[in-house]
């Protein structure tokens, strides 16, 4: 899915690179969740090995990694705030958070 057509002008300004984007590497453990700003949620739902997750994202945008059992409460507590940057906190936003599940 192409998301930039769904973003507001303010959101586009945040995600479009103004400098070289460097990869951010995360070691994702089983039963952990990654929030990539307010646009994407990745749940590692099944597996028994750690996975290296490389995200190419502006350093201005937040990424949160946490145990999956804490993710729903975290998400419910930050709705309506700017903690995740873009995607769920802005009433103008057309996007909700997308959820991907990984099985290894």
Image (tube, helix red, strand yellow):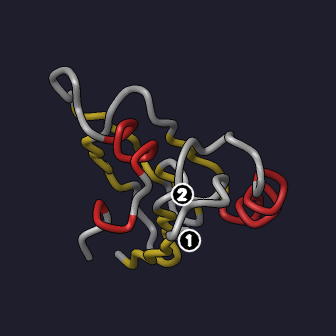
Circle 2 packing at 10 Å, graded few (<14), some (14-19), many (20+), is: many
Circle 1 packing at 10 Å, graded few (<14), some (14-19), many (20+), is: few
Residue 87: which disc? 2
Residue 88: which disc? none
Picture coordinates of residue 54, whole percent (x, y): 27, 45
**Depth check, front residue: 79 or 72:** 79
Q: Is residue 58 above or below residue 33?
A: above
Left or right, residue 30 beside residue 102: right
For the C terminus, the quadrant is bottom left
**Depth check, front residue: 91 or 33:** 91
**Depth check, front residue: 23 or 97:** 97
Taking the spot 29% from the left edge, 60% from the top edge, the residue there is 4
Secondary structure at numbered mark 2: loop
Taking the spot 23% from the left edge, 32% from the top edge, the residue there is 17
Residue at the extreme top of the image, as rendered? 19
Q: Which residue is under mark 1?
A: 96
Picture coordinates of residue 10, whole percent (x, y): 45, 42
The Cα atoms of the two marked residues, 1 and 2, are separated by: 6 Å
Left or right, residue 71 beside residue 49: right
Secondary structure at numbered mark 1: loop
**Depth check, front residue: 88 or 43:** 88
């Amino acid at each position: 899915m192409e998301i930039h057509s769904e973003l507001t002008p303010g959101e586009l300004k945040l995600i479009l690179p103004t400098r070289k984007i460097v990869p951010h590497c995360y070691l994702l453990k089983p039963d952990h969740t990654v929030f990539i700003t307010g646009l994407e949620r990745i749940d590692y739902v099944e597996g028994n090995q750690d996975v290296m997750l490389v995200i190419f994202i502006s350093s201005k945008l937040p990424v949160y990694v946490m145990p999956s059992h804490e993710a729903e409460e975290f998400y419910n507590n930050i709705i309506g705030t700017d903690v995740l940057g873009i995607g769920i906190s802005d009433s103008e936003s057309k996007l909700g958070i997308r959820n991907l599940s990984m099985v290894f």
